[in-house]
Protein backbone atom coordinates (compact mmCIF):
# COMPACT_ATOMS: atom_id res chain seq x y z
CA UNK A 1 0.00 0.00 0.00
CA UNK A 2 1.28 3.47 -0.91
CA UNK A 3 2.46 5.88 1.75
CA UNK A 4 0.93 9.37 1.74
CA UNK A 5 2.06 12.54 3.51
CA UNK A 6 -0.89 14.21 5.24
CA UNK A 7 0.22 17.60 6.57
CA UNK A 8 -3.16 19.35 6.49
CA UNK A 9 -6.75 18.55 5.53
CA UNK A 10 -9.39 20.74 3.89
CA UNK A 11 -12.61 18.94 4.69
CA UNK A 12 -15.84 19.50 2.76
CA UNK A 13 -19.20 19.37 4.57
CA UNK A 14 -22.32 18.86 2.42
CA UNK A 15 -22.21 15.31 1.10
CA UNK A 16 -18.98 14.55 2.97
CA UNK A 17 -19.84 14.94 6.68
CA UNK A 18 -23.61 15.34 6.38
CA UNK A 19 -26.53 15.38 3.98
CA UNK A 20 -28.94 18.16 4.91
CA UNK A 21 -29.51 17.57 8.61
CA UNK A 22 -28.42 13.93 8.67
CA UNK A 23 -24.84 12.94 9.57
CA UNK A 24 -22.84 10.70 7.28
CA UNK A 25 -21.57 7.56 8.96
CA UNK A 26 -18.20 7.87 10.75
CA UNK A 27 -17.89 11.63 10.11
CA UNK A 28 -17.29 12.34 13.78
CA UNK A 29 -14.80 9.50 14.08
CA UNK A 30 -12.81 10.73 11.07
CA UNK A 31 -12.47 14.22 12.57
CA UNK A 32 -11.43 12.70 15.89
CA UNK A 33 -8.67 10.81 14.08
CA UNK A 34 -7.38 14.09 12.63
CA UNK A 35 -7.35 15.63 16.10
CA UNK A 36 -5.61 12.63 17.63
CA UNK A 37 -2.93 12.70 14.93
CA UNK A 38 -2.62 16.49 15.38
CA UNK A 39 -3.18 17.07 11.67
CA UNK A 40 -4.22 20.69 11.02
CA UNK A 41 -7.58 20.93 9.29
CA UNK A 42 -10.41 23.26 8.35
CA UNK A 43 -14.04 22.60 7.54
CA UNK A 44 -14.47 24.34 4.17
CA UNK A 45 -17.92 24.80 2.67
CA UNK A 46 -19.41 26.44 -0.40
CA UNK A 47 -22.62 26.87 1.60
CA UNK A 48 -23.10 30.58 2.29
CA UNK A 49 -26.31 30.45 4.34
CA UNK A 50 -24.85 29.84 7.81
CA UNK A 51 -22.36 31.77 9.92
CA UNK A 52 -19.19 29.92 11.02
CA UNK A 53 -20.59 29.56 14.54
CA UNK A 54 -23.82 28.11 13.16
CA UNK A 55 -21.85 25.64 11.04
CA UNK A 56 -19.83 24.58 14.09
CA UNK A 57 -23.02 24.20 16.15
CA UNK A 58 -24.62 22.08 13.42
CA UNK A 59 -21.58 19.82 13.23
CA UNK A 60 -21.62 19.36 16.99
CA UNK A 61 -25.32 18.46 16.94
CA UNK A 62 -24.54 15.83 14.31
CA UNK A 63 -21.77 14.28 16.37
CA UNK A 64 -18.77 16.04 14.82
CA UNK A 65 -16.71 18.05 17.28
CA UNK A 66 -16.09 21.48 15.77
CA UNK A 67 -15.07 25.00 16.74
CA UNK A 68 -15.99 28.24 15.00
CA UNK A 69 -12.33 28.97 14.24
CA UNK A 70 -12.14 25.72 12.25
CA UNK A 71 -14.84 26.77 9.76
CA UNK A 72 -14.29 28.61 6.49
CA UNK A 73 -17.38 29.42 4.40
CA UNK A 74 -17.78 30.85 0.91
CA UNK A 75 -19.32 33.93 2.56
CA UNK A 76 -16.07 34.57 4.42
CA UNK A 77 -14.25 33.97 1.16
CA UNK A 78 -16.31 36.63 -0.62
CA UNK A 79 -15.70 39.14 2.18
CA UNK A 80 -11.96 38.50 2.03
CA UNK A 81 -11.95 38.72 -1.78
CA UNK A 82 -13.67 42.13 -1.63
CA UNK A 83 -11.43 43.46 1.16
CA UNK A 84 -9.51 45.52 -1.42
CA UNK A 85 -12.71 47.56 -1.87
CA UNK A 86 -13.32 48.67 1.75
CA UNK A 87 -15.82 51.40 0.92
CA UNK A 88 -17.90 49.35 -1.50
CA UNK A 89 -21.68 49.35 -1.44
CA UNK A 90 -23.09 45.85 -1.92
CA UNK A 91 -26.46 44.43 -2.84
CA UNK A 92 -26.48 40.93 -1.34
CA UNK A 93 -28.88 38.19 -2.38
CA UNK A 94 -28.47 35.58 0.30
CA UNK A 95 -29.13 34.60 3.86
CA UNK A 96 -27.72 35.45 7.27
CA UNK A 97 -24.33 33.82 6.76
CA UNK A 98 -23.51 35.93 3.71
CA UNK A 99 -24.83 39.23 5.02
CA UNK A 100 -23.16 38.87 8.42
CA UNK A 101 -19.78 38.11 6.84
CA UNK A 102 -20.00 41.22 4.68
CA UNK A 103 -21.13 43.47 7.55
CA UNK A 104 -18.35 42.14 9.80
CA UNK A 105 -15.84 43.21 7.14
CA UNK A 106 -17.26 46.72 7.19
CA UNK A 107 -19.23 46.74 3.94
CA UNK A 108 -22.36 48.82 3.48
CA UNK A 109 -25.27 46.66 2.39
CA UNK A 110 -28.18 47.95 0.37
CA UNK A 111 -31.38 47.49 2.35
CA UNK A 112 -33.93 45.20 0.72
CA UNK A 113 -36.55 47.94 0.89
CA UNK A 114 -34.36 50.95 0.01
CA UNK A 115 -36.22 52.17 -3.05
CA UNK A 116 -34.54 55.58 -2.89
CA UNK A 117 -31.02 54.39 -3.71
CA UNK A 118 -29.80 55.32 -7.17
CA UNK A 119 -29.08 52.28 -9.34
CA UNK A 120 -25.56 53.56 -10.09
CA UNK A 121 -24.55 53.71 -6.41
CA UNK A 122 -24.05 49.95 -5.99
CA UNK A 123 -20.54 48.59 -6.58
CA UNK A 124 -21.14 44.84 -6.28
CA UNK A 125 -24.04 42.41 -6.46
CA UNK A 126 -23.16 39.34 -4.39
CA UNK A 127 -25.28 36.22 -4.84
CA UNK A 128 -25.49 33.22 -2.52
CA UNK A 129 -28.16 30.68 -1.77
CA UNK A 130 -31.40 32.51 -0.92
CA UNK A 131 -34.44 30.41 -0.07
CA UNK A 132 -36.55 33.58 -0.17
CA UNK A 133 -35.44 34.58 -3.67
CA UNK A 134 -38.02 36.67 -5.53
CA UNK A 135 -38.54 38.32 -8.89
CA UNK A 136 -38.03 41.72 -7.23
CA UNK A 137 -34.56 40.69 -6.03
CA UNK A 138 -33.73 39.44 -9.52
CA UNK A 139 -34.92 42.71 -11.07
CA UNK A 140 -32.97 44.91 -8.67
CA UNK A 141 -29.78 42.90 -9.13
CA UNK A 142 -30.07 43.12 -12.91
CA UNK A 143 -30.59 46.89 -12.81
CA UNK A 144 -27.61 47.46 -10.48
CA UNK A 145 -25.37 45.40 -12.79
CA UNK A 146 -26.63 47.23 -15.88
CA UNK A 147 -25.51 50.46 -14.18
CA UNK A 148 -21.99 49.30 -13.36
CA UNK A 149 -22.10 46.87 -10.42
CA UNK A 150 -19.92 43.75 -10.67
CA UNK A 151 -21.48 40.32 -10.15
CA UNK A 152 -19.89 38.05 -7.52
CA UNK A 153 -21.17 34.54 -6.75
CA UNK A 154 -20.41 32.69 -3.55
CA UNK A 155 -20.18 29.45 -5.53
CA UNK A 156 -21.37 27.89 -8.80
CA UNK A 157 -23.09 24.84 -7.25
CA UNK A 158 -26.22 23.99 -9.21
CA UNK A 159 -27.33 21.17 -6.91
CA UNK A 160 -26.85 20.31 -3.24
CA UNK A 161 -26.96 16.80 -1.74
CA UNK A 162 -29.56 16.47 1.03
CA UNK A 163 -31.48 13.65 2.68
CA UNK A 164 -34.30 14.44 0.21
CA UNK A 165 -32.01 14.19 -2.81
CA UNK A 166 -30.28 16.84 -4.94
CA UNK A 167 -31.86 20.27 -4.53
CA UNK A 168 -31.13 23.60 -6.33
CA UNK A 169 -28.00 25.43 -5.21
CA UNK A 170 -26.94 29.07 -5.27
CA UNK A 171 -25.40 28.66 -8.72
CA UNK A 172 -28.92 28.45 -10.13
CA UNK A 173 -29.80 31.85 -8.64
CA UNK A 174 -26.52 33.40 -9.77
CA UNK A 175 -27.09 32.10 -13.29
CA UNK A 176 -30.53 33.70 -13.29
CA UNK A 177 -29.04 37.05 -12.26
CA UNK A 178 -26.29 36.72 -14.84
CA UNK A 179 -28.78 35.99 -17.60
CA UNK A 180 -31.04 38.85 -16.56
CA UNK A 181 -28.26 41.45 -16.36
CA UNK A 182 -26.50 40.09 -18.54
CA UNK A 183 -23.14 39.49 -16.85
CA UNK A 184 -20.60 36.76 -16.16
CA UNK A 185 -20.13 36.21 -12.41
CA UNK A 186 -16.83 35.92 -10.59
CA UNK A 187 -17.17 32.89 -8.32
CA UNK A 188 -15.29 32.54 -5.03
CA UNK A 189 -16.17 29.05 -3.81
CA UNK A 190 -14.90 25.73 -5.15
CA UNK A 191 -13.89 24.85 -7.87
CA UNK A 192 -12.23 28.28 -7.90
CA UNK A 193 -9.03 28.24 -5.82
CA UNK A 194 -9.80 31.23 -3.55
CA UNK A 195 -11.12 29.31 -0.52
CA UNK A 196 -8.29 26.78 -0.54
CA UNK A 197 -5.71 29.56 -0.91
CA UNK A 198 -7.27 31.38 2.04
CA UNK A 199 -7.31 28.15 4.06
CA UNK A 200 -3.62 27.51 3.33
CA UNK A 201 -2.79 30.99 4.60
CA UNK A 202 -4.86 30.49 7.74
CA UNK A 203 -3.14 27.18 8.54
CA UNK A 204 0.25 28.35 7.25
CA UNK A 205 0.69 25.24 5.12
CA UNK A 206 1.62 24.57 1.52
CA UNK A 207 2.41 21.80 -0.96
CA UNK A 208 1.22 18.33 -1.88
CA UNK A 209 0.90 17.34 1.78
CA UNK A 210 -2.35 19.31 1.79
CA UNK A 211 -5.34 17.02 1.21
CA UNK A 212 -8.73 18.21 0.01
CA UNK A 213 -11.46 15.73 0.90
CA UNK A 214 -14.92 16.01 -0.61
CA UNK A 215 -17.79 14.36 -2.43
CA UNK A 216 -17.85 16.47 -5.60
CA UNK A 217 -15.31 15.76 -8.32
CA UNK A 218 -16.20 18.99 -10.14
CA UNK A 219 -15.69 21.30 -7.16
CA UNK A 220 -13.63 19.82 -4.30
CA UNK A 221 -11.32 17.79 -6.51
CA UNK A 222 -11.09 20.40 -9.26
CA UNK A 223 -10.03 23.12 -6.79
CA UNK A 224 -7.34 20.87 -5.32
CA UNK A 225 -6.07 19.93 -8.78
CA UNK A 226 -5.66 23.60 -9.75
CA UNK A 227 -3.36 24.16 -6.78
CA UNK A 228 -1.41 20.91 -6.95
CA UNK A 229 -2.89 19.55 -3.71
CA UNK A 230 -3.62 15.90 -3.09
CA UNK A 231 -7.30 15.03 -3.08
CA UNK A 232 -9.67 12.30 -1.96
CA UNK A 233 -13.12 11.76 -3.41
CA UNK A 234 -15.61 10.06 -1.08
CA UNK A 235 -18.65 8.48 -2.71
CA UNK A 236 -21.10 9.62 -0.04
CA UNK A 237 -22.75 12.60 -1.73
CA UNK A 238 -22.82 14.28 -5.13
CA UNK A 239 -20.45 12.23 -7.30
CA UNK A 240 -20.99 8.54 -7.93
CA UNK A 241 -18.54 6.02 -9.29
CA UNK A 242 -19.95 6.29 -12.81
CA UNK A 243 -19.15 10.02 -12.96
CA UNK A 244 -15.42 9.60 -12.45
CA UNK A 245 -14.42 8.36 -15.91
CA UNK A 246 -16.21 11.21 -17.68
CA UNK A 247 -14.56 13.94 -15.57
CA UNK A 248 -11.34 15.74 -16.46
CA UNK A 249 -10.51 15.89 -12.75
CA UNK A 250 -8.47 13.09 -11.21
CA UNK A 251 -8.51 12.58 -7.44
CA UNK A 252 -5.46 11.08 -5.79
CA UNK A 253 -7.72 8.59 -4.03
CA UNK A 254 -11.31 7.44 -4.35
CA UNK A 255 -12.97 5.92 -1.28
CA UNK A 256 -16.40 4.51 -0.61
CA UNK A 257 -16.58 6.43 2.69
CA UNK A 258 -14.46 8.16 5.31
CA UNK A 259 -13.67 4.94 7.15
CA UNK A 260 -12.15 3.47 3.99
CA UNK A 261 -10.30 6.72 3.35
CA UNK A 262 -8.75 6.72 6.83
CA UNK A 263 -7.49 3.20 6.15
CA UNK A 264 -6.05 4.16 2.75
CA UNK A 265 -4.27 7.17 4.28
CA UNK A 266 -3.10 5.02 7.23
CA UNK A 267 -4.50 7.50 9.73
Image (cartoon, helix red, strand yellow):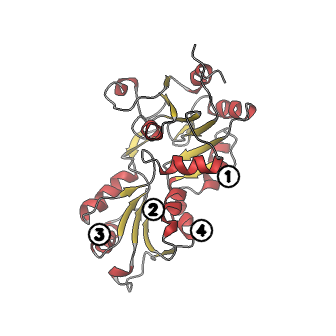
Residue at x 52%, y 32% (from the top left corner): 230
Q: CA distance from mark 2 to mark 1?
A: 22 Å
Q: Which residue is mark 4?
A: 104
Residue 256 in percent (x, y) is at: 50, 22
Front of the two marks 3 and 2: 3
Residue 102 in percent (x, y) is at: 53, 67
Q: CA distance from mark 4 to mark 1?
A: 15 Å
Q: Are marks 3 and 4 in contact (CB under 8 Å)?
A: no
Classify residue 206 by image quadrant. Answer: top right
Q: Are marks 4 and 1 in contact (CB under 8 Å)?
A: no
Q: Secondary structure at mark 4?
A: helix
Q: Which residue is mark 3?
A: 142
Asked if 200 appears above or below 130 in the picture, the reply is: above
N-terminal label among 3 and 1: 1
N-terminal label among 3 and 2: 2
Q: Residue furthest front?
A: 207
Asked if 44 appears above or below 213 in the picture, the reply is: below
> Is residue 140 toward the left or the right of residue 4 in the image?
left
Residue at x 35%, y 28% (from the top left corner): 243
N-terminal label among 3 and 4: 4
Q: CA distance from mark 2 to mark 4?
A: 15 Å
Identify the disc placed on residue 69.
1
Q: Quadrant of the N terminus?
A: top right
N-terminal label among 2 and 1: 1
Q: Which residue is mark 2?
A: 94
N-terminal label among 4 and 1: 1
Q: CA distance from mark 3 to mark 2?
A: 15 Å
Camera-nearest residue between 248 and 46: 248
Q: CA distance from mark 3 to mark 4?
A: 26 Å
Q: Secondary structure at mark 3?
A: helix
Q: Are marks 2 and 4 in contact (CB under 8 Å)?
A: no
Amino acid sequence: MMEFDVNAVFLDLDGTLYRGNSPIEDAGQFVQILRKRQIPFLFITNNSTLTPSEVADKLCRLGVKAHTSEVLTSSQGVAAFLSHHPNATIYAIGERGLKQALVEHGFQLVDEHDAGLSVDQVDFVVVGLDRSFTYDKLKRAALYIQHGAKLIGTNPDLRLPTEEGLIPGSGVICRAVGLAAPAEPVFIGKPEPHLFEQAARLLNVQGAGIWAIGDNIETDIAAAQQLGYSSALVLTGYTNEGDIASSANRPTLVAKNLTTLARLLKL
